[in-house]
Amino acid sequence: MEVKRINLALQGGGAHGAYTWGVLDRLLEDERLEVEAISGTSAGAMNAAVFADGMGRGGRDEARRALEVFWTNISQAAQTGPLQPSPFDQLASGWNLDHSAAFVAFDMLTRMLSPYQLNPMNLNPLRGALEKSIDFARLEGCRKVKLFISTTNVKTGKVRVFKSGEITADVLLASACLPFLFQAVTIDDEPYWDGGYMGNPAIFPLIYGAETPDVVIVQVNPLGCDRVPTTATEIMNRVNEISFNSSLMREMRAISFVTDLIDDGKLDSDKYKRINVHWIEAETQMRGLGVSSKLNARMDFLLHLKQIGRQTAAEWIDGHFDAIGKRSTINIMQKFL
């Protein structure tokens, strides 16, 4: 059996990270694929840490079980919260929370008051779910999978990438710290916000910190939209999608530029690393989900996203396994220009 190594780049997206759960679950089933390193942001960072902890504890089967436990813990933590889809939501807007009175009130409050005013005790339900799901002491010494977790330094505006051996609950919470919802997470006396502002996910750590040239990007946030948004909610949703894809698009263009120079013999391939880029996405399905659904952690929704992830990962494996280690399976210039 031919075994091929890949690196993974996992986007963030709140509850939409359950789509990535499905992708990882399907990739772990295929023993022909071996993951060397993962770069993750926000929900992608949490998926990455749970994946690595499970692999270090007991291999593929344990990693799959760990991911299921984590997302179950996320759903259970959300059950007691006010952000639940109303019956009208379920009938009119699928998985969105647009007509939930609690969501509308919460959305208005976060536009007028900061998390320092709304949540002075700085309570974060994600912390409990993470600490129940990951043994951070064991993860600190785990080298089964290299981890790169992106955060944004509030003061400098620069990306900071935490590596294997540095991953704590605070690092993962910092990577998922949306500034309108949570207080900045302080690490080493520096404040951090969501890593998606500067790297969603960051690709450069996989270029410099891993040997494998093949990077599989698991896209959660849609790149395009079907029509011009006209309502305030639709506009905000589209702004978020563009913002959280912008850094990735810039890195993709840079990778394409360097690859062309290597292929044309203008750069020494012994000094510059040629990257094969692969893409797993469910653009059509994810476009139909509004920004409010990123806060919907009902288990039926998470399982729905997981199934979409498994299906798209299976289709990618069937169509592109032979190309791993040889060439990219997307046209970067066509996709991003």
Image: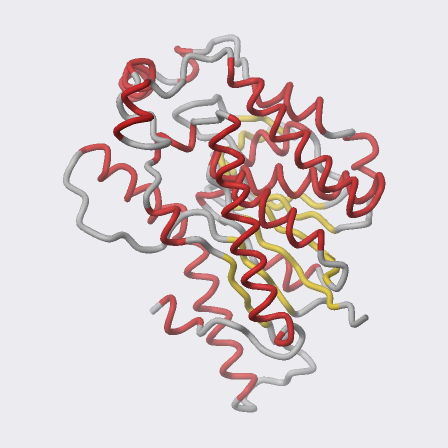
Q: Nearer the viewer, residue 329 or 22?
A: 22
Quarter occupied by the N terminus: bottom right
The chosen color scheme is: secondary structure
Quarter occupied by the C terminus: bottom left
Q: Position of residue 321 (x, y in %)?
A: 63, 70
Instruction: Residue at the far top: name it.
Output: 121
Height in image: 330 above or below 219? below
Q: Position of residue 156 (x, y in %)?
A: 48, 40
The answer to whether residue 151 is left or right of residue 29 is: left
Q: Nearer the viewer, residue 148 or 145?
A: 145
Q: Nearer the viewer, residue 222 or 196?
A: 222
Residue at 78% x, 72% y is 2
Residue at 56% x, 70% y is 319
Q: Nearer the viewer, residue 83 or 52?
A: 83
State the count of labels: 0
Q: Position of residue 334 (x, y in %)?
A: 37, 73
Height in image: 159 above or below 260? above
Q: Position of residue 142 (x, y in %)?
A: 82, 43
Instruction: Residue at the far front: name it.
Output: 91
Instruction: Residue at the far left: name it.
Output: 230
Height in image: 281 above or below 41? below
Q: Quadrant of residue 98?
A: top left
